[in-house]
Amino acid sequence: MNGMSQYLLRLYITGKSARSERAIANLRRLCADELAGAYEIEVIDILERPELSESERILATPTLVKALPLPMRRVIGDLSDTAKVLLGLELVEREANGSDAGALP
Amino acid sequence: MIEPQRGAALSTAVPSVAEGQGILLAGADAAALDAAAQVLTQGGYSVMQATNGEQAWRLARERRPRLVLLDSALPEPGAAEVLRRIKADSDLEAIAVLLSTTARFGDLESAEAFDIGADGYIVRPIADHHLLGRVRAQLRQCDLADQLRASEARFRDLIQGQADAVLVVDGEGLIRFANTAAVRLFARPAATLVGSSFGHPIEGEHHVELEVLRAGLVLTVEMRVAPTSWEGAPAWIASLRDITERKRMDENLAAAQRIAHLGSWEYEIDSGRRYWSEETFRIFGLIPHSDTVSDAEFLARIHPDDLAAFQATRQRALTGKASFDVEHRIVRPDGEERWVHERGELQRDAHGRPRAFSGTVLDITERRELAERLQQSQRLEAVGQLTGGVAHDFNNLLTVILGNAEILADELRPSPQQAALAEMIAGAAQRGAELTQRLLAFARKQALDPKVVDINQRVMSMDGLLRRTLGEHIEVELVRGGGLWQALVDPGQLESALLNLCINARDAMPNGGRLTIETGNVRLDHDYAERHIEVSAGQYVLVAVTDTGSGIAPDDLPRVFEPFFTTKPMGRGTGLGLAMVYGFVKQSGGHVSVYSEPGEGTTVKLYLPRLPSDNALEAAGDVGDANTVSGGSETILVVEDDELVRRFAGGQLRALGYRVVEAHNGQQALEMLRAHDDIALLFTDVVMPGGMSGRQLADAAQEFRPELRVLYTSGYTENAIVHQGRLDSGVMLLPKPYRRADLARMVRRALNAGS
């Protein structure tokens, strides 16, 4: 991991299915769009490395784990919705409840 | 008032108190217990009493009172211990415990009692009506707690009974609850699941598909997410459904459709929407982009010439008057035309009104192409049989005309004017014989004499002839393939075929052009062989003749091999050139194909069978001088059912000095062979009526006359003499019609063969 990488993201997939390919593509797009080069992606196929999925207690895939920076966070499911993924990984500030943000003026 | 009353009798449980109904009074002071019991009994409650800790614990466990009034001064064990035991036992969670204490009593701090789980306390002394009121209030609270517990139990039963795995995931992504289906899905106990990290569940537009790895099997799971709250904090309920089986069936169905080129569709009548399977998209040359396609989008793909008929058929089917079963063309986005076969069925709603139209679409392009080729090939075969039969009879007639004309010409030599007439007859008959030869070639009934041929050498040797035939306005190019295999064909017929092709090319290029003859080695694979009639996969020597002429119209293309089919002006073509080429190549075990672009030119490809590498057949060599006529004095048996031909042949042979006996069928011939032991040669027609072919006759004769020489003659030769279009080794054949010189030469050769 080079000194530039601020984010370490691990994507757990199962085999080389179309769904896996989609998840990888979504993640790459998200990182390119939002993390400005300061990231590292590890893709882990749990069919190839079952011991990792066991030690990390990966229950289902695709699971995306933000290993760095701490705190560690994970999301599971559809990675196509960038906003939801960023929110799930706590890569953006959660908006306070009752905020008027987004309401029409 | 509950006052300790010393000396009161130790009272055990009040009889006949239903479980979960009564009140248990526990205290060291029996008199005080009695007094309190009296108040509560009068208040309508069933009461049990215990004067020490063990007894209180036993009653609590066995009788399950609703409420326990625990005196803080209870001995053996103390009130704190009894309270702890009751609260630690989940079976007794419905029991409420009130601690009865005095303000000055200090061995059990009320705070500690609440820590252990006391539901409340009363301070003695207490007025009777206060005691009753306090007990009533506590029991009401018990009822509420019961209802809550029952409601939670119902909720839990509902969740537990779900076939879908249900997880409650908190804001940190940790699992807080997992139902039994979740335990089954993940094959982990609830205790392990709860507290482990699942992750923040993110749903797609509708739902999302996940994989779960369980015992080496990859399951497909559909997840739906709903927000909820858990212990006051926001959380999610994620329900996961195992759709592995459904996915597998979907995939099987899609695979079956793909393999069969059979797509399925549904057309919703009201909305005009069409639902297409993936294979339907593929058949239409589209990438599966969504579940639905508009009807306009679909109709735009139908071939314009077929659209009106398609819509009429569909309209009739939509009214329920006719079934929907239609074949039509479609045009893919890249312009490719395909043939499809659609079948559909009307679907009605509960009121019997047409709701939708569903059915299948089958890509039948290959099947149609094959059927067309088969039809074409069958037509050629039928014409071939007819042609073969007619040509056979013509040959017999021409043999007589030609032979007699030649005799006349000889005999009329002193009178040149009459001799010229006889020679004209002979010449015309000779041309007629050449035409019938082509007909026989087309009918695959000519006697072929395949030889090992170096095609490059053959083509080179024809160069001069071709240039003379084609004329100066046509440029000739020969492209000879390197390392060319040797072919096994009749070299004379090959030359005729190439000459025919060049004449066609010349006629297609009246204003000049370029003719290219290419040779090369090719392998036709099984795929190609399957798509073409009468083609075997294997190795071939290719000869391709290409012109830059007018080309062949697509409508004419399927018929070019038919005899008498010609696009040349009246009187220019016989319509037998390509027919001869076709018959010759097919009979040789090869294959012909024609490619043509109108206005651009035509390529005819001859695929000639490659010589098997271990074949040691002699190379083609020229036979002896055809003009030498030599006779003999041996006895020859002429067997021929046609009297004219028999008499002609007999006359010719006698003229050559031979002795001749004649028979008109096989039986008669056998009798003569037995009667005349001087017969040296059997000269027999191959095809004769009377149940015995020339071959059978020869076989029968050679049984008792093994030294007998045999010469066959035939207009065409059946399998009896020509095996797969080739002469059986050792068999000699004189094809009809024949000239006197041919007859003389072949008879001499046959007679000399044994000596």
Image (cartoon, coloured by chain):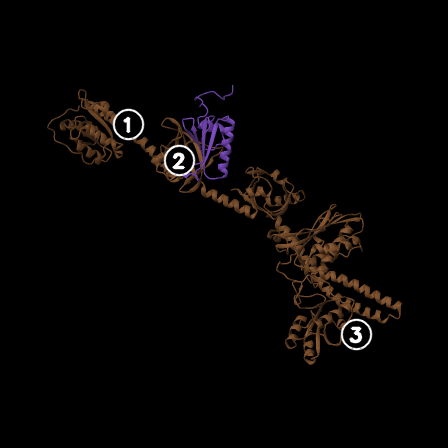
Chain colours: A purple, B brown
Secondary structure beneath label 3: helix
Q: Chain letter of disc 3?
A: B
Q: Chain letter of disc 1?
A: B
Residue type at the position of mark 2 = Val
Quadrant of the rendering where the C terminus of chain B is positioned: bottom right
Give the distance between the C-alpha atoms of the residues marked 3 and 1, in whole angstroms: 141 Å
Sequence-wise first label, 1 or 2: 1
Q: Chain letter of disc 2?
A: B
Callout 3 environment at 10 Å: few (<14), some (14 to 19), or many (20+)? few
Establish whether labels 2 and 3 are both on one chain: yes
Depth check: give the residue in front, B103 or B377. Answer: B377
- Residue B313 percent coordinates (x, y): 63, 45
Callout 2 environment at 10 Å: few (<14), some (14 to 19), or many (20+)? many
In this rendering, the label closer to the viewer, 1 or 2: 2
* B428 sits to left or right of B2: right
Give the distance between the C-alpha atoms of the residues marked 2 and 3, in whole angstroms: 111 Å
Residue marked by disc 2: B166
Depth check: give the residue in front, B375 or B104. Answer: B375
Which label was assigned to residue B655? Answer: 3
Task: Relative to B258, say whether B579 is above or below.
Answer: below
Q: Quadrant of residue B354?
A: top right
Residue type at the position of mark 3 = Ala
Task: Relative to B159, say whether B485 is above or below.
Answer: below
CB of mark 1 within 8 Å of CB of mark 2?
A: no
Q: Which residue is found at the position 78% from the left and 63% from the top?
A: B432
Residue B150 seen: yes
- Residue B282 percent coordinates (x, y): 58, 42
Which label was assigned to residue B141? Answer: 1
In this rendering, the label closer to the viewer, 3 or 1: 3
Depth check: give the residue in front, B65 or A64. Answer: A64
